Image (tube, rainbow, N blue to C red):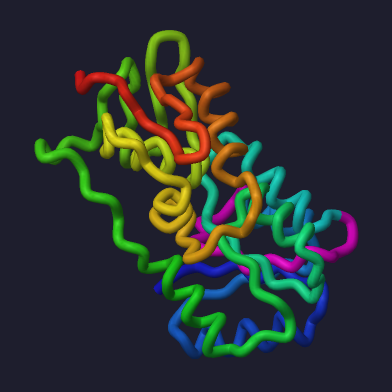
Amino acid sequence: MSNVLVVDDEPRVVSFLTRFLIAEGHSVASANDGEGALEHLRGNDVDLVLLDLVMPRCSGLQVLTDMVSDDESTPPVIVLSAVNEVGARVQALDRGAIDFVQKPFHAAELVARIRRNLVRAPQPRQATGDRFLSAGGIQLDLDRRRARGDGFDAVLTEREFGLLAHLMRRRGDVCRKDELLHDVWGLEFDPGSNVIEVCMRRLRTKLDEPPIETVRGVGYCFYGEWA
């Protein structure tokens, strides 16, 4: 059973989502604005968030921003919104959302998207079975999503962790943008935004310029040697 947080200021939507999520076997909590969502996330284990964008006191975009800035790992977020502008989708994905579902939505499609992001298989670890990946002066803790090295000790967000782990496991290979969108973000399409670039900038800031080469127009390559 997974813990799902529903964040929406429309009681009718919250009631509907709660009923069918419980029917699917999930445990459901709810918040009617962004501040309530952030308060719940700080004190409870949450496996996935369903987040509206337009809410009083604190918008969904602000919730996404604050979740990324928190010093803890963050659950995946699926945005549910009646806002249909492409710019809103791009902003939500740039700030860490894994998916964007337009209101009104079909329950069966939403359940499939939730299932995909809750049961996504974990990445294989090194052949040694260790909980760490160590290369290029970086020790990545696969259990705690923490990266350590000379001069830094950083807790990573889910996407930062996924991107770094993917690149480290593919050490020496150029990982294309479409591959990263699929394997790290779970997207079957290019949303036309710079979600990867934004995530990479945060990684480089946190890890004091890790050994990751930008291959312009193609993707990224981790070139550090295994420790």
- Residue at x-position 35% and y-position 37%: 174
Which image quarter: residue 83?
bottom right
Q: Quadrant of the N terminus?
A: bottom left
For the point 46% across and 86% down, the residue is: 24
Residue 178 % position (x, y) = 45, 53
Q: Position of residue 152 (x, y in %)?
A: 47, 15
Magenta stretch contains residue 35: no
Give coordinates of residue 206: x percent, y percent.
53, 23
Residue farthest along the front direction in this orientation: 217
> Which of these two is toward me, 64 or 5?
64
- Left or right of residue 5: residue 83: right
Q: Residue 210, relative to residue 97: is it above or below? A: above
In this picture, is 9 found above or below 91?
Answer: below
Picture quadrant where residue 60 is located: bottom right
Q: How many marks?
A: 0
Q: Decide if residue 146 is on the left or right side of residue 93.
A: left
As drawn, the residue found furthest toward the right would be 56
In percent of width and height, residue 26 lies at: 47, 78
Residue that appears at 43% across and 25% down: 213
Residue 211: image quadrant is: top left
Describe residue 178's horizontal placement relative to residue 12 as left or right.
left
Quadrant location, the C terminus: top left
Q: Residue furthest top?
A: 151
Q: Which stretch is magenta?
A: 42-57
Compared with residue 187, is residue 74 higher up or lower down, i.e. above or below? above
**At 62% across and 82% down in the image, what residue appears?**
18
121 and 27: which one is in front? 121
Residue 54 counted in the magenta span: yes
Q: Main secondary structure of the magenta part?
A: loop
